[in-house]
Structures are given as C-alpha cells and as structure tokens.
Image: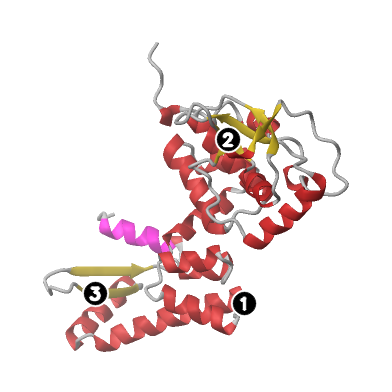
Amino acid sequence: MAEKPLLKRGLGRGLSALMADLGTDLAKEAAPAAPPPRSPERLMPVESLRPNPDQPRRTFEPAALEELAASLRTKGVIQPLIVRPDPHEPSAWQIVAGERRWRAAQKAGLSEVPVIVRNYDDAELLEIAIIENIQRDDLNPIDEGAAYRSLIDRFGHSQEQVATALGKSRSHVANQMRLLGLPAEVQRMVADRTISAGHARPLIGHPRALDLARRIAERGLSARDAERLAKTAQAEKQKRERTEKDADTRAIEGELSAALKMGVRIDHGAAGEGGRVTITYRNLDQLDDLLRRLSGG
C-alpha cells in the first residue's frame, strides 16, 4: 500500500504518547527537591549529540543557561534528554527534547548526559520539540506562533486540533499566529520582550507599526495605552487622507454614505485609474441590509 503523504498525518503517534516520553515534570529538571528520574537507557558523550534543526526555540537566554549550568555542576542532569539516530550522521544522535540541558551541560563541563533513545520520524521530531517548549511556557510569543504555524502548514492540522491537543484555547493559538504578520523588527522586539504580545497586537496591519512599537517601548506604555495609541494614529491618518482628497471625491463619499447610511471611503490608486471603495458597517443588521441591496433583494 502506498504511503500517505505527510500532510495527511494526524498528530504523530498521538500527543498522549509523545507527552509520555517527555517525562512527568520537564520544568523541574534542576529543582533541588525533584524526585529521582526514571533510569535512562544510556549515557552518551555530549559531543555525539546534535541539535534539532527544527527546534522551535530560536533563542537561548545566556543568563538562564548559566544558571542551569551552575545547577548541573552540583546535581547533574536529572531529566534525561530524548534523542534519535541522526539521519545525516550515522555516528551521531539528534536531540529531540532537551537541547537547553545539552547546552547547559557543555557550559558545566559535563562529558556525558543521560538520554532516552526513540525512533521518531521527522514529523514526530518537530511535534515533540514544539510540545516540550510550549508545555514549559518558555517560548517567546513569536517562536510560539511560528511553532503553531509549522504544525498547521507542514502537517495539515487545524487551529482547533492544535489548540485541543496542546491544551490551549483556539483564540490563543490564533492570536500568537497573528503576531507573525508584524514587521520583522517589531517581531524582534516582541521576541526579546522589549514589548509584550499585548502591546503588539493592536499594531498588526498598522502602517506605522514599527514607529508606534518604539514609542510604546520608550514611554513604557501599558497594553491598553498601546491600543489607544494605535487607534489614535490610525484615526489621524484617515483624517489627513480625507482632508487631502479633492472636493469631488469627498462629495461622492458623502453621497454614497447618505444613500447607504454607512461610512464610505474612496481611495484612488497611485496611477489614478483604479482604486478602492471601503464601506463600514456598525452591526450585522447593516451588513445584511447592504447585501440585500447589492443582490437586488
């Protein structure tokens, strides 16, 4: 029987099976009172391990790594890493979960780390890496949104499937993915915590997103203040555009607005031969009325 294409897969072997492999308490591998871990299958030299090229987390905070390394020097690696045979290097092993521990172990001067070997395919490799980071709650919002996008685009999952499987709300998944629509520089500001996701969401699609993000950071504004700033800037932009329009265009906007009893805005294209008409409705009843008019009902 022919193998099904990757996009037709479900969530790997099942998220419950993948989560079981991660152990019961990923967030406490360095805690002093942590219970003894299950026996690892083996110890492996740190130099034989390779990072996951699809690791969702793109940044590892140096201070946090140093703190973990200091703990590993005294307690060792309590939670084993999960690895698989490296498909590109027969003598090496690819890290599925635990790259942060591996990096900290090198800083701590450890020569070996405990590992559990699993034979995951590429899809499961990405899924479990995403699960580990998301369950830890230490992915920045941009990396988290990109991880959700990978699960959806590469494996054909819906937002609802991803949200249910990972114990998140659908709106949370959607909101984190929406952040990927921000300009690259604003995304970097969110990723390094210069501004929060709450500050950034009102800037999605805003023509002055970068300028406003910098003002939010410089002034230390709250998320609510950031939303007001974005709305005010957009209103000022629209007001300037209206005053810059010629009298004929403003007259047509007024006539259409009066006829439809809705806000109407006309924007001419740069070439002057085309443009866009935007109709603003206040509620769904107004929208239904507009659709009836357009359909001749």
The numbered mark at residue 267 is 3
Q: Quadrant of residue 25?
A: top right
Q: Relative to the observer, which residue lies in front, 70 or 277?
A: 70
Residue 81 visible, this orientation? yes
The quarter of the picture where residue 260 lies is: bottom left
Q: Earlier in the sequence, mark 3 or mark 2?
A: 2
To which quarter of the image does residue 240 belong? bottom left
In this orientation, does residue 128 appear? no
Q: Residues within 10 Å of mark 3 (few under 14, many from 20)?
A: some
Q: Horizontal placement of 76 versus 208: left or right?
A: right
* Nearest to viewer (mark 3 / mark 2): 2
Q: Quadrant of the C terminus?
A: bottom left
Residue 174 vs 207, above or below: the answer is above
The residue tagged 1 is: 222
Kind of residue at disc 2: Ser
Q: Residues within 10 Å of mark 1 (few under 14, many from 20)?
A: some
